[in-house]
Amino acid sequence: MKPTANVDKFAPKAYFHVYNHAVGNDNLFRLRDNYFYFLAKFKEYIAPVCKCYAYCLMPNHFHFLLQVKSQNELFNFQEQYKPKNLGDSIDWHKVLMNQLSRMLNGYAQAYNKMFERKGALFLDYTRRKEVELLKYLNNLIYYIHHNPVHHGLRNDVRDWEFSSYNSMCSEKPTILEREATVGVYGSKNDFEHFHLSNQARTGFINQFEF
């Protein structure tokens, strides 16, 4: 897979691999509650404008596989985005970047206050790569879920609490695109088999390395 450069712009219905890292040697998450708070911010700012197919929160970085919602869905999110004249155009990239900035800034402010910290928490530039070849979604979803194993934090994807893997295997209500994500592999059994049988392999990792 060869995603386009990191200057890819958000657009309705397009798929994106979105990721960022803490500055320097800092961590983004020190406590279990930090992870939950970050996900709450995601639900507040990103879920209304994007569908989420997979995510993983690591101590010092995060990954999301997102699809920007359709133009009509975005209109429903904010009436103000509807053009007043037929010839008007909307900068959807700006709309999405504003939501992303609000999420990260809100989390960073709370984090800095909690730990009596000052300065930037995230790298200035949140990477975003458009996923143009949807046949590669299975490997990208695997890569995202595999991060804790790849970085030596766990030996099994099922043992990391802060990824979407276990939610995909669950029957509990979720805001994630569970049916569509599992459908990429065929069935839930196929989804689990693909993830668990390939844990010792690194071939998928090289395509998406952060």
Image (tube, rainbow, N blue to C red):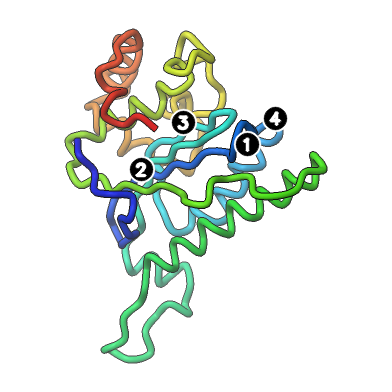
Which numbered circle lies on residue 158?
none
Left or right relative to 179: residue 22: right
- Residue 152 coordinates in the image, percent (x, y): 49, 13
Label 2 amino acid? His
User: Dot 1 surroundings within 10 Å: few (below 14), some, or many (20 or more)?
Assistant: many
Give whichever of discs 3 and 2 has the lower sequence position: 2
**Residue 17: image tag:** 2
Image position of 41 (left or right of 55): right
Q: Badge 4: how crowded within 10 Å, few (<14), some, or many (20+)? A: few
Q: Compute the Cα span from label 3 to label 2.
A: 14 Å
Q: Give the crowd class for mark 2: few <14, some 14-19, many >=20 residues within 10 Å.
A: many
Q: Amino acid at mark 4?
A: Arg
Disc 4 to disc 1, C-alpha distance: 7 Å
Give x and y (percent) for residue 93.
38, 65
Residue indicated by mark 3: 164
Farthest residue, direction bottom: 85
Residue position for label 4: 30
Give the residue type at disc 3: Ser
In this rendered view, identify the residue nearer to me: 172 or 195. 195
Question: Which numbered disc flags the more N-terminal residue, 1 or 3?
Answer: 1
Mark toward the start of the polypeptide (2 vs 4):
2
Describe the element under mark 4 as helix, strand or loop: loop
**Residue at image location 34% in from the left, 69% down from the top:** 72
Which residue lies under the disc numbered 1?
Answer: 28
The CA distance from mark 3 to mark 4 is 20 Å
